[in-house]
Image (spheres, rainbow, N blue to C red):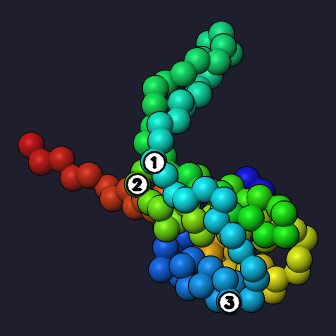
Amino acid sequence: MEKTDYILNHCCLDALRQLVISLEAKFALQIVKEPSLGLTMIRAEDSVESQEFYLGEALTTDCEVSYNQITGYGICLGDEPVRAYCIAVVDALLQSGTPIPELDEFLSTHEAKILLKEKLSTTRYNAPVLILK
């Protein structure tokens, strides 16, 4: 599920919104809690003593959606109510165990796009430096 959360938080929002619109037409989803802003404590671990501490607070948006009495929860950084709702919908449907081919295809396609983007962003060219005296 952690990989799915990462994909949903980093994929294109328009594509995610279109997927959820198509899923809403097929499944009876109910909003349990509208998207709302909140502050979430960010945990970290001290690298020397391996002791947990809190870095501070981050602005988050969270939402809850229900499908067949299964609650899906969506949370993301920042003020993104649409993304939080979409994540909650996907979470509820995945927890239900209902096979959804278009959702599986979306996740695999966008995982590949995100991995490629990350790979390209870490690729660097180290040009030789010419020092003139």
Asked which quadrant contains residue 111, the reply is bottom right
**Going 58% across and 18% down the picture, which residue do you hit?**
53
Check disc 3 and give the amino acid type: Ala
Using the numbered discs, state the Cα–Cα distance from disc 1 to disc 3 in whole angstroms.
27 Å
- Mark found first going from the N terminus, 1 or 2: 1
Assign the C terminus to one quadrant of the image.
top left
Check disc 1 and give the amino acid type: Leu
At numbered mark 1, what does the secondary structure look like: helix, strand or loop? strand
> Neighbour class for label 1 at 10 Å: few (<14), some, many (≥20)?
some
At numbered mark 2, what does the secondary structure look like: helix, strand or loop? loop
In the displayed image of the protein, which residue is found farthest to the top? 49
Using residue 41 as the reference point, say whether residue 107 is left or right of it: right
Q: Nearer the viewer, residue 46 or 101?
A: 101
Q: Is residue 123 in sight in this rendering?
A: no
**Going 74% across and 89% down the picture, which residue do you hit?**
26
Q: Nearer the viewer, residue 11 or 28?
A: 28
- Mark found first going from the N terminus, 3 or 2: 3
Q: Any mark on residue 118, and which?
A: none
**Which residue in the structure is indicated by mark 3?**
25
Using residue 120 as the reference point, say whether residue 27 is left or right of it: right
Q: Are marks 1 and 2 in contact (CB under 8 Å)?
A: yes
**Which residue in the structure is indicated by mark 1?**
37
Q: Please, is residue 116 above or below residue 100 in the view? A: above
**Going 57% across and 65% down the picture, which residue do you hit?**
85
Q: Any mark on residue 79, and which?
A: 2
- Mark found first going from the N terminus, 1 or 3: 3
